[in-house]
Image (spheres, coloured by chain):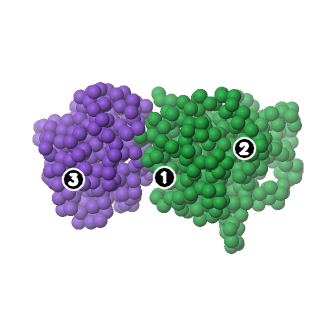
Amino acid sequence: MSKGRFGIHGGQYIPETLMNAVIELEEAYNRYKDDPDFNRELTELLNEYAGRPSRLYYAARMTEDLGGAKIYLKREDLNHTGAHKINNVLGQVLLAKRMGKTRVIAETGAGQHGVATATAAALMGMECVVYMGREDTIRQALNVYRMRLLGAEVRPVDSGTGTLKDAVSETFREWTSRIEDTHYVLGSVMGPHPFPTIVRDFQAVISREIKQQMLEKEGRLPDAVLACVGGGSNAIGAFYHFIEDPQVRLIGCEAAGRGVDTFETAATIATGRLGIFHGMKSYFCQDEYGQIAPVYSISAGLDYPGIGPEHAYLHDIGRAEYVPVTDEEAVNAFEYLSRTEGIIPAIESAHAVAHAMKIAGQMGKDKILVINISGRGDKDCAAIARYRGEDIHD
Amino acid sequence: MTDVREARAGMKGAESSRAGGKTIRIADAFANGKAFIPFITCGDPDLETTEALVKAAAENGADLIELGIPFSDPTAEGPVIQEANERALKAGTTTDKVFALVARLRETLTIPLVFMTYANVVFSYGTERFLSECVRVGIQGLILPDIPFEEKAEFEPACREKGLELVSLIAPTSEERIGMIAKEAAGFVYCVSSLGVTGVRKEITTDVGAMVKLVKAAKDIPCAIGFGISTPEQARKMAAVSDGAIVGSAIMKLIAAHGRESVPYVAQYVREMKDAVRM
């Protein structure tokens, strides 16, 4: 069995041209991950530049309104650039710099990972090119402008469905043509080994903090941790240090789009099956002949036909649950959290809020639930307004 | 011919397919001087045209033909073959229809045929079932660009068991990996001439001859060079330092331009390219 396996999932299903690049990356990561200088510099950046640790906020009004479990919000939306993506990006760009790379490329869906990569590249004086599906450049025009403002070049991708999966394909193609000076900053816990492990390790800071903050505030572990899942980087970050605590329920909220009984969905665990794509074996939305399905979600960041291999494994062994949440439920939650707590969550994170709204009331008042608010929702306001039939300019 | 197909359907673990009593092998492609290997995406613009194109290519000197089974997200391809894949899928091409096409072609065709597709097309069909169908219809091997040496255990043992050859690829970045890959290679080694994805290139700057030498030092196996070749001059140069030239995008461009009328254009192109590599 090849490297980077999570049960049967994972692996390195990529063209030979890229093999030495991922081997080089793995060697560099193994060299630096426990290196005191590297970690000092990364921690300094995470704390002083990105604003970590992020707060664990007790949502009193939401708790009271839902009438069940105590609800805490992990405020990844308060990070610099407005989402959890910066955790991984600072780690990878620092690593790329140590490897002598002068240029970074990245895919982006909602634009949050692209903005984070453009930000880190600006900070560290590196050239940056971001691939973004044409459709997403329209849905997330503000983030396109932010990336350009930060000095990155944004290349719209027209192939396929013009969304996140096509942006990933195009970034892999670009990497194949230029490896020597270029690092691919993959934005989620997906792709070929070592990416799922590297991205998880850089995002694991989320659950490390939740655990510590929860012990400080409540003197015990939470009963459930909820996070939205596209590729699954914020979710694995929020889950990781709780995997060893079986009493903590881990719940990943997938984007069901218009429903898991329609083709307009991106819920991979609910509607996908085992496959090999984008460098990994995992679950994918696909037809009977293995053609990757053109998935749909209102959320550009969850609009991906696969799921990271470690999530596929956590699903297989029953350690984590994966539930579908529709556009409508997510939009309701987006508005609910804005009104109830004065926090506008990213539409991605609103999927996790929506599921919390379903289960909190059924849990006892002695129970504790943590929702990872992976990002802020400013970028989504125009799209949500459109969804509600209101036309505002981005 | 029906009885021949039925007989093939019953073959299990066959060494390779037969036509007119003669066993067809990938090695045949390299027995006729330097090989010219065209790639054709099945179903672009439709499967009837593909059938005529494959026959015309064989009649005009193709030594082996790579048949592309279209995939929705061909990550190793440049725009020309990406678009060919899209057109083929839109036209309703499926893996089963491609198997039926090959079965029809095998009624007359005696040159080796390999499938070039992506891992998920094989895996999702059921690897065992897919490979059995390959044997039944008369395919000799598989090229899967998203299966590197490290992952070949996914398909290679099953291929070997059925007498099919899983072709290995080496790239300009392979360097010290070439020996390891070549030692376990089967059929022929596909030498990727350039960085990047498939597509026409003005110049090929990699020293592909040196890559071929490293392969040959590890194993006596034919080497064919692909990626970026479009002109007879390029094909001649590449064939001079290897055992053959592979051309995909230049052919798919002709098919994109001429659609159902593309057969004579492709026939003439294959003839010119085979003349260029023949020596």
Q: Secondary structure at mark 1?
A: helix
Q: Are marks 1 and 3 in contact (CB under 8 Å)?
A: no
Q: Secondary structure at mark 2?
A: strand
Where A241 sits versus A361, above or below? above
Out of A259 and A215, give the one closest to the viewer: A215
Q: Residues within 10 Å of mark 2 (few under 14, many from 20)?
A: many
Residue located 84% across and 41% down the image: A364
Mark 1 vs 2, N-terminal side = 1
Q: Residues within 10 Å of mark 3 (few under 14, many from 20)?
A: some
Chain coloured purple: which letter? B
Q: CA distance from mark 1 to mark 3?
A: 30 Å
Mark 3 chain: B
Q: Nearer the viewer, mark 1 or mark 3?
A: 3
Mark 2 chain: A
Return the mark for residue A226: 2
* Residue A338: % across, % down: 80, 58
* Residue A10: % across, % down: 52, 36
Return the mark for residue A170: 1
Q: Are marks 3 and 2 in contact (CB under 8 Å)?
A: no
Q: Secondary structure at mark 3?
A: helix
Q: Amino acid at mark 2?
A: Leu
Q: Quadrant of residue A19?
A: top left
